[in-house]
């Protein structure tokens, strides 16, 4: 008899997203059937933190994270940091999704950096892991991280799209690197080069559901749909894992075991 496969950890999702409003229960059922044992659900703004908390309290396989995403810094209230600390204290959780972004045109870089640094300090004081978003801001991210006090808990760069030459400096700071199914798109040359260079003990995978839908061969034919369009979901993770195993020249069972160990280590006590 073959042994039971090692469980999977989807390192970055947004299950609170409205894209799942009509199908969320089935999405969670499909994830469980696919062997996805843990899903790290990231809040992005004050408005969705209550939904993340409710999901985590209702489903034991959801690891909650609360953070203010750089896209939403303009909408923050005067009490945003106090509210964030409240949610982080309400349940075992991580800090995320937080970070820096120069892709959006209408941005306030001063506010982005202030908000990011405040959340890093909160993660440091609470000893919580951090889920970092970075888009077209890699030099800026490195400057901020080098200036900040080192984090006592881990940090993860979600959907890593940075240059290969930053992998080792970030790893030296304690970073983990998560890749979504989009790395299986042959046009994503830089991400495909990067994933092959990530130390195996720092590699994680994610769906970023409902976003970053992988190429067609790496997703289920039946996935959640909103307004007639397909959206990504955690049940696609096994196919993504298989594609990544082939991309980096690893056997699927061995990579699955490595990712499980990495995810548990990154999350610490958040995924018992």
Image: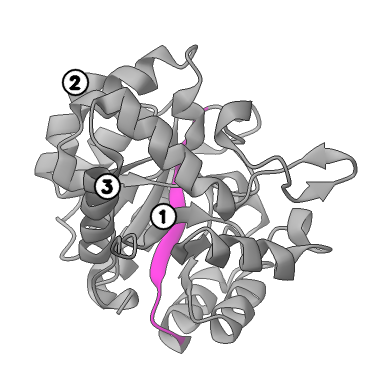
Q: CA distance from mark 3 to mark 2?
A: 29 Å
Left or right of 258 in this view: 229: right
Residue 106 picture location, percent across and down: 66, 32
Residue that appears at 29% across and 50% down: 256
Q: Which mark is residue 165?
A: 2
Please tell me which of labels 2 and 1 falls first in the chain.
Answer: 1
Mark toward the viewer: 3 or 2: 3
Q: 81 or 189: nearer the eye?
A: 189
Residue 40 picture location, percent across and down: 46, 63
Q: Quadrant of residue 105?
A: top right
Query: Is residue 130 visible to us here?
Result: yes
Q: CA distance from mark 3 to mark 1?
A: 18 Å
Q: 31 or 147: nearer the eye?
A: 31
Q: Is residue 247 above or below residue 235?
A: above
Query: Is residue 77 visible to us here?
Result: no
Residue 216 picture location, percent across and down: 63, 28
Magenta-colored segment: predominant secondary structure: strand
Please tell me which of labels 3 and 1 falls first in the chain.
Answer: 1
Q: Is residue 210 above or below residue 68?
A: above
Specify few, some or many for label 3: CA neighbours under 10 Å numbering under 14, 14-19, or 20 or more.
Answer: some
Tag 3 residue: 253
Residue 126 magenta-drawn?
A: no
Q: Which mark is residue 11?
A: 1
């Amino acid at each position: 008899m073959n042994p039971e496969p090692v469980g999977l950890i989807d390192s970055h999702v947004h299950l609170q997203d409205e894209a799942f409003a009509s199908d969320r229960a089935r999405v969670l059922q499909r994830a469980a059937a696919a062997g996805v044992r843990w899903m790290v659900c990231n809040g992005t703004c004050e408005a969705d933190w209550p939904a993340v908390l409710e999901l985590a309290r209702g489903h034991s396989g959801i690891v909650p994270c609360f953070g203010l995403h750089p896209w939403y810094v303009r909408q923050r209230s005067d009490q945003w940091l106090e509210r964030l600390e409240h949610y982080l204290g309400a349940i075992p959780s991580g800090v995320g999704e937080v970070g820096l972004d120069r892709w959006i045109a209408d941005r306030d870089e001063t506010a982005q950096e202030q908000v990011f640094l405040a959340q890093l300090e909160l993660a440091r004081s609470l000893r919580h892991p951090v889920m970092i978003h970075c888009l077209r801001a890699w030099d800026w991210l490195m400057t901020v991280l080098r200036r900040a006090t080192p984090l006592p808990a881990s940090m993860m760069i979600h959907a890593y799209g940075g240059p290969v030459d930053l992998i080792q400096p970030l790893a030296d700071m304690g970073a983990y690197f998560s890749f979504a199914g989009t790395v299986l798109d042959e046009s994503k040359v830089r991400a495909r080069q990067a994933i092959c260079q990530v130390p195996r003990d720092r590699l994680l995978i994610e769906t970023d559901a409902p976003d970053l839908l992988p190429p067609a061969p790496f997703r289920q034919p039946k996935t959640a749909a909103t307004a007639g369009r397909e959206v990504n979901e955690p049940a696609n993770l096994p196919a993504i894992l298989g594609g990544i195993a082939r991309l980096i020249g690893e056997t699927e069972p061995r990579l699955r075991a490595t990712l499980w160990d990495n995810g548990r280590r990154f999350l610490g006590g958040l995924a018992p």
